[in-house]
Image: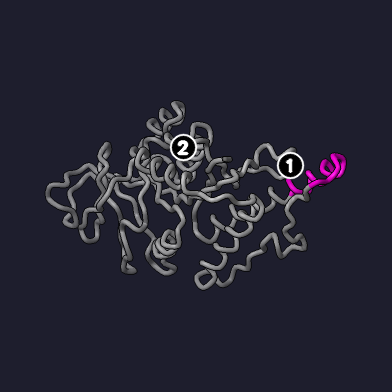
Amino acid sequence: MFTAQFSEFSYGYALTDNILHCGFPYTPQAPVFPSLIAEGSSGGFDVRIPLYPVPMFLQFKVPQIMRRASGKMPRTFFPPYLRMHLRTRRPNQHQLLLDWEGSGHITRYATPDFWRTRELDESFSKGSVHLQSYYIRPGSLGPLEEKPHCLAYRQGRDEFWICSEPKKLEGHFAAEVFAREIGRGIAEARRREPLEFLQTLAEEIAEATRSRVPQLDSPLVRSQGEPHRPPSQGKAPADAEAETPTVYRRLIRAAREVAYMAQIRLGCTLAITGRDK
């Protein structure tokens, strides 16, 4: 057994960068990553929250390389193969993500179809890390007992097995399949005012995780003395220009807040895609 030559952080960085700059096929625009929105933004350029937003939550996983056969796998599943671990001990993160997905949010484990640094470098330079990754729904695994569990897969094959069973997962998890699911979500999205959308999403995360992470209090934007007020209509140009920086500051603050909540409470990186009409 060997660990991948790169860290979860390195993979997550490469995957995020390639999604941000290249986007997914079948989707109208590349996602926004609220965690990358800068405090010093001016004019709202790097906020760009779509008017019809679709949030998606990704938990990055890097695999181990298994070079010997395992009694926990079918005899037809020959080594070498890759294996990613799931966190099911208390606190049961898999159950948390399963519940979060069940509430209607796009939630995925993201894992690469490679394990060498050379492969990561080559994929990154081609802008294809996100296309050479798999996106597994927590719901495809279902509830799991609080004991060690992992998913096994072989390079180049969109086929996953739960090692502890063993049980083959139903469905397909390649980037193209995930992209089509995102596209359907975008087509069905409803219009949301960006600031209200971000604040509501942060509140939903806080509420969903309150019993599991009770020691964390959510410093939500609305509770910090700046109640949500959508931009006023019919103002004179001078007044509108004076209000704009405040609106953008609130957007940036709310975006960074919800990114923090997703990472700390769900263990996921948040990306927001969608459309503007």
Q: Quadrant of residue 223?
A: bottom right
Q: Quadrant of residue 25?
A: top left
256 relative position to 55: left or right: right
Q: Is residue 263 above or below residue 33?
A: below
Q: Amino acid at mark 2?
A: Thr
Q: Which residue is mark 1?
A: 40
Q: Position of residue 268 (x, y in %)?
A: 49, 53
Circle on res. 228: none
Secondary structure, magenta segment, majority class: helix
Between 208 and 276, the one lying in front of the other is 276
Q: Amino acid at mark 1?
A: Gly
User: Which residue is situated farthest in the front direction here?
Assistant: 234
- The region drawn magenta spans 234-249
**Inter-mark Cα distance, 2 to 1:** 29 Å
Q: Is residue 178 above or below residue 100?
A: above
Question: Was residue 245 drawn as part of the magenta stretch in this picture?
Answer: yes
Q: Position of residue 143 (x, y in %)?
A: 33, 65
Q: Secondary structure at mark 2?
A: loop
Q: Which residue is mark 2?
A: 27
